[in-house]
Image (spheres, coloured by chain):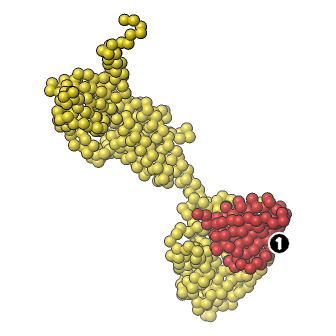
Amino acid sequence: MSPVDPPSDSALLREVRHWLALAVEDLGFGVAVAEAGSERILFANRYAKEVWRRLAQTDGVAAGYRGFARDGRPYSPEEWPLRRALRLGETVSHEEISVEFASGTKGVLALSAGPIRNDHDELVGAVVTMYDLTDHRRAEETLKFMAEASAVLTESERDYEHMLRRLAHLAVPRLADWCAIDLWENGMIRNVGVAHVDPAKVELAHELQRRFPPAPDSPRGVANVLRTGRSELTPEIPDALIDEATPDPDMRQILRDLGLHSAIVAPLSAHGETLGALTLISAEQRRTYTSDDLILAEDLGHRAALSISNARLFREQIEINQALQQSLIPDTLPSLDGVEVGAVYMPAGEGSQVGGDFYDAWKLEDGAFGVAIGDVQGKGPRAAALTSLARHTMRAAALHATSPAHVLRLLNDAAIRSDFKQFCTAIYLTMTPAADGFTTTVAVAGHMPGMIRRANGLIEQAGRPGTLLGMYEDVKITDDTLHLYPGDALVLFTDGVTERRDGQRQFGEGRLRAVLSAAADQEAAATARSVADAVGAFSSSPAQDDIAIVVIRVLETDRAERVA
Amino acid sequence: MSKLLTTTETSTGRTVTVVFTGTLDISTIDQALAELAEARAEAPELVIDLRQVDFIDSSGLSVIAQTAQQAAETGFTLSVVPNAQARRLMEMTGIASYVRIEDRDA
């Protein structure tokens, strides 16, 4: 043959066929051709042979293996796509069939098939293509799981045990047949959640934990991971391993019967501390965990640990704040001769911030006493520090100051020098026993004046407005002296009461006056409670500000004694 | 949507006027303070116009109080054009005596 001669058609054809066979052999999906009648496989590429091998089949036509449609209905042998193409001439496009591989692992295959006809339109064979979707499906499920897990981990931070249980349930059955989460607390392993699709098995797990509590010194599993902070991957769990790790024969048999196949134990670690462990076990699904799954579990464990750590910090912060708050508000006010005292304090929010409201009462000389209420700008530790300063300065100043206004001016000096750069409002008043009641002197600094509820229900103002404290050297604060008769009550409150909002409406002074007037026959504690209830009922939205109410009521019995 | 709107106008390079519109309460304090800090850098005289504010409470008033404090410390001039609610709060807390109050028709 000379170089210029074109190759004969048949030679070209042979060559093309050869290339085609080579190309098809290495395709990234399975291709096979079967002959009609004999239903013999004439050709199958590497991928197809590998799929059949994993299904423990020599070829795809024998179809001894089981498959299931998406709704769980089993495929009969005639229903498989290649059969339908081969016998009925049907074209099947992308049918997803769930299968169980010989290893016991469950998977998903996508099958397509079509008939092959000769020039006379006679059905001579069929071609089938197949693709193993198992890994794709798993990756999709994993992505979905991670998205849902992220939501759980961020949303329910406060109650982290509930969060961990939800996480365990999310993992089943997508990542595992079993998921357990254990916490390491005071040298003990405490299980906080076990999940399995079958509730009876969850119950079994709980029973096993009761009968065979985990030993903290166990060389494998949860105990080991908690101790070392390092994860464990056991791709396949042979019975020998169960036997070795389980001294009790009953337990050993139960574990063997569960058909545990593959396991991962990952630490819940954050900030260099191992708080617990996450266990994933594949049993029924016979999924064999890989190093990719381990990375996923470790990541999940780390994120769960961060959430636990945050929740614990938050809890601690609330406890500290509550302790701090209690140090700012007296547990009980002192019992004072001739009056009864009632107080209500309601912090806004869940105690994550220390509020700035305070009140106090203390005895002075000769049966007299002082009462203070105030509100420090802002919240948190700085506000708490200024609140503390205010209370103690007032108590100290009250001993030698000439009047309530003087006490507040001394507090102003202290607040300005303190460098808090925060201001506060306050009322300080003294009550001195006198004929038929108490002589009362009230000084107000930037605060809402108090109210007097006369025994007959009339409401009067107590105190004249004065400058707030902590901002200006020279403040205008005046003493207002008045007389309280038996049955009269003095009501002090913070702006959380009058400024309680319902949309753009405020509770306001008018409503407060009405509530007080209507409660004219109530004792001090009941009066304070009535005001708090009315404020609470005014709006359904959560309060933005703390509420403090102090009521001092002059006792009627006092009058009886004096008259006698 | 923000509960507080701010417009800032500078006139003659000496006076900057910040007009607040909407709600001045605990939820908008930080925003208001930030706007004021920015405006203050522009001119030596600051005017806070509250006539368009439809709600102010004592938390909102702390914005005026803090700005008044800064004015006293750093020596800029502060004037406030209050609405009725703000005026009442400023009188009750005594702030009215320490800042220049400008009455303008609403």
Spot the residue most to the bottom: A563
Q: Position of residue A58 (x, y in %)?
A: 22, 23
Q: Nearer the viewer, residue A562 or A15?
A: A15
Compared with residue B100, is residue A486 higher up or lower down, i.e. above or below? below
Residue found farthest to the front:
A4
Left or right for A492, reference A253: right
Residue located beneath label 1 in the image: A474
- Disc 1 residue type? Asp
Task: Using residue B100 as the reference point, say whether residue A278 is left or right of it.
Answer: left
Q: Colour of chain B?
A: red
Chain identity of mark 1: A
Residue A186 seen from this side: no
Q: Residues within 10 Å of mark 1 (few under 14, many from 20)?
A: few
- Identify which residue, A226 or A186, lies in the foreground: A226
- Residue for point 53% across, 54% down: A315
Instruction: Please name the residue shown 64% across and 70% down the image.
Output: B22
Q: Is residue A159 visible?
A: yes
Task: Say left or right for A111 vs A488.
Answer: left
Secondary structure state at the residue bearing disc 1: loop
Q: Quadrant of residue A146?
A: top left
The C terminus of chain A: image quadrant: bottom right
Q: Colour of chain A?
A: yellow
Query: Which quadrant holds residue B103?
Result: bottom right
Report x, y in % for residue A36: 17, 27
**Residue located 21% across and 29% down the image:** A117
Q: Height in image: B101 above or below B37?
A: below
Residue found at x 51% / y 47%: A307
